[in-house]
């Protein structure tokens, strides 16, 4: 019998009182794509970090191709033929592709021979695996999809036979994700073994041969992908049945709540980030904004939320909103009936060291229900927080617990509870389920739809096209600070939206990947410069 490419036996790892991995055993066969899924905090990343030498297991054994192997650090993992492509790439942005590929794997003290050898090896790898890149391109000037190829080439250059990919499509458009899957299929054909960590069940079903499910630090099941279903996998992950589609009735939009005309934003470096945005959101509907991150969606939310100045016209319920000056801040927006769930909950939505009860009051701490004379009524805030935690199923339901001690999904619920419970006329919501597990996603979607059904207007920004198509009633696509097109979600699909995200408005004619990629490099390049 063929020995597994990887076999982990009885792996356990604790961080203080938290048992991240508990007696985990798993076998990954050579030349296969093996998926690993699980809720936030299930222990997936810890397990892979042990395999890649970032952590040392408290107990257990690792076998590579049937041989017991000690992996005390990442250098040992690389020597054992393991490569890892992280969700957030480990590239030096002002280095070229070639320089990044040889970084840490140079031959001796002279750089020129190393670069010459690497260039030849890179050309061979490109041909063998259809991983075309420009070796002289600077990382900060190429798109995210191309950067991901560089990370894969880095691992292959170091002769990796086993590749671990952590949430590889989190920042990719559908076209880029399809290209990545073609590359992974080619790697599999060449005998490489791939471990894919993802929360996207559709990707698991499309590309993997086998899938392992983790829950609360334990391995709950390993099944052949062809013999399971998304519904079964979701139930194995969460421990209960999960509704994988957004359950909602058709929208019944009425009067215009938000009217935006010719909105323009120029940043501190003189770069125009919004180039004349026009859009409307009506009561009782969800308008989704799709696009590659960094193409103006964040600036749109910042202006509407009172975080940034702009020119143009914005009206709420027919009344003009100040876009500059003392009446254009977040407090003024809240007073006008705008609630805002920001894209980055940890940087913009919460103060991580403060307790949950303090975070639920931020922005609304002057509310009469929260004050007693000139002082805050802390008892009232804590009681209100306890009620919100119960209604929004925040776990654990402890108002005194610091925000940093909640999981990402529960942090998001705290922010949602604070904003939705204010009964806003307009809800701005950015990346509502970023980094959130499948059980919390179901709950968050239900809350957004419920608010819509109460007759509220919702502007939703998400990089997840599946989420946009499931939640939104209409979708507008942004590219390079402009609206490229608007569609009814019932009358479009991911392919059409993906082309619009790449700046291609003629979606009826065929396009090759090179054309799409050239546009996406421009889109991603703007995002990189912004960062």
Image: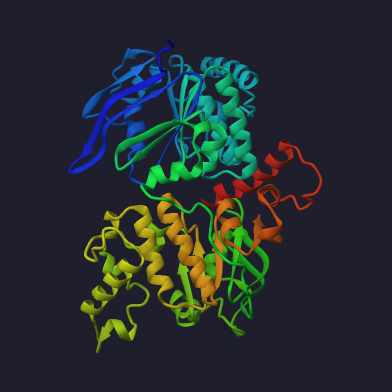
Q: Nearer the viewer, residue 158 or 258?
A: 258
Residue extending farthest left: 17
Q: Nearer the viewer, residue 45 or 310?
A: 45
Image height of 440 relative to 102, above or below? below
Q: Is residue 114 left or right of residue 346?
A: right
Q: How many marks?
A: 0
Image height of 113 relative to 213, above or below? above
The quadrant of the image that shows the N terminus is top left
Residue extending farthest right: 509
Image height of 422 relative to 407, above or below? below
Q: Nearer the viewer, residue 327 or 405?
A: 405
Q: Is residue 482 visible?
A: no
Residue 72: x percent and y percent? 28, 23
Examine the image and state in which quarter residue 440 appears. bottom left
Q: Is residue 357 left or right of residue 417?
A: left
Image height of 493 relative to 400, above or below? above
Q: Nearer the viewer, residue 333 or 258?
A: 258
Residue 70: x percent and y percent? 28, 18
Q: Is residue 98 left or right of residue 8?
A: right
Examine the image and state in which quarter residue 360 appears. bottom left
Q: Is residue 251 visible?
A: yes
Q: Is residue 75 left or right of residue 402?
A: right
Examine the image and state in which quarter residue 133 appears. top right
Rendered residue at 43%/72% (across/down): 420
Rendered residue at 55%/80% (across/down): 322
Residue extending farthest bottom: 373
Rendered residue at 37%/34% (across/down): 221
Residue 529: x percent and y percent? 56, 49
Residue 397: x percent and y percent? 26, 62
Colouring style: rainbow
């Amino acid at each position: 019998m063929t020995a597994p490419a990887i076999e982990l036996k009885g792996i356990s790892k604790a961080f203080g009182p938290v048992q991240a991995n508990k007696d985990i055993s798993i076998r990954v066969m050579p030349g296969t794509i093996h998926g690993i899924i699980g809720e936030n905090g299930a222990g997936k990343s810890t397990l892979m970090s042990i395999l890649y030498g970032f952590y040392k297991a408290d107990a257990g054994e690792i076998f590579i191709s049937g041989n017991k192997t000690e992996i005390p650090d990442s250098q040992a993992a690389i020597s054992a033929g393991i490569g890892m492509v992280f969700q957030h790439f480990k590239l030096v942005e002002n280095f070229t592709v070639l320089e990044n590929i040889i970084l840490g794997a140079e031959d001796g003290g002279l750089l020129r021979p190393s670069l010459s050898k690497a260039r030849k090896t890179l050309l061979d790898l490109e041909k063998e695996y259809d991983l075309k890149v420009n070796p002289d391109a600077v990382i900060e000037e190429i798109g995210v999809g191309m950067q991901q190829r560089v990370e894969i080439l880095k691992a292959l250059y170091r002769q990796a036979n086993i590749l671990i990919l952590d949430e590889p499509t989190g920042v990719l458009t559908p076209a880029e994700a399809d290209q990545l899957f073609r590359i992974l299929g080619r790697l599999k054909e060449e005998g490489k073994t791939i471990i894919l960590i993802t929360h996207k069940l559709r990707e698991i079903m499309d590309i993997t041969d086998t899938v392992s499910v983790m829950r609360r630090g334990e391995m709950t099941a390993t099944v052949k992908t062809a013999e399971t279903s998304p519904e079964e996998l979701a139930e194995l992950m969460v421990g209960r049945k999960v509704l994988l589609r957004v359950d909602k009735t058709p929208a019944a939009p009425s009067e215009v709540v938000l009217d935006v005309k010719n909105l323009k934003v120029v940043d501190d470096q003189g770069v125009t980030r919004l180039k004349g945005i026009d859009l409307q959101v009506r009561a009782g509907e969800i308008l989704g904004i799709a696009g590659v991150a960094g193409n103006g969606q964040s600036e749109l939310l910042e202006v509407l939320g009172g975080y940034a100045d702009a020119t143009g016209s914005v009206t709420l319920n027919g009344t003009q909103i100040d876009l500059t000056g003392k009446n254009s801040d977040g407090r003024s927006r809240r007073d006008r009936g705008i609630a805002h769930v920001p894209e980055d909950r940890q940087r913009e939505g919460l103060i991580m060291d403060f307790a949950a009860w303090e975070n639920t009051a931020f922005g609304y701490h002057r509310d009469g229900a929260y004050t007693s004379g000139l002082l805050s009524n802390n008892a009232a805030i804590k009681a209100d927080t306890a009620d919100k935690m119960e209604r929004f199923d925040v776990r654990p339901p402890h108002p005194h617990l610091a925000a940093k001690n909640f999981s990402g999904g529960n942090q998001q619920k705290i922010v949602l509870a604070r904003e939705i419970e204010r009964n806003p006329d307009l809800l701005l919501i950015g990346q509502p389920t970023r980094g959130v597990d499948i059980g919390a996603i179901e709950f968050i979607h239900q809350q957004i739809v419920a608010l819509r059904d109460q007759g509220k207007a919702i502007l939703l920004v998400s990089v997840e096209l599946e989420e946009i198509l499931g939640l939104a009633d209409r979708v507008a696509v942004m590219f390079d600070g402009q609206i490229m097109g608007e569609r009814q979600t019932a009358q479009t699909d991911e392919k059409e939206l993906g082309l619009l995200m790449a700046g291609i408005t003629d979606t009826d004619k065929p396009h090759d990947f090179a054309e799409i990629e050239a546009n996406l490099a421009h889109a991603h390049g703007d995002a990189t410069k912004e960062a």
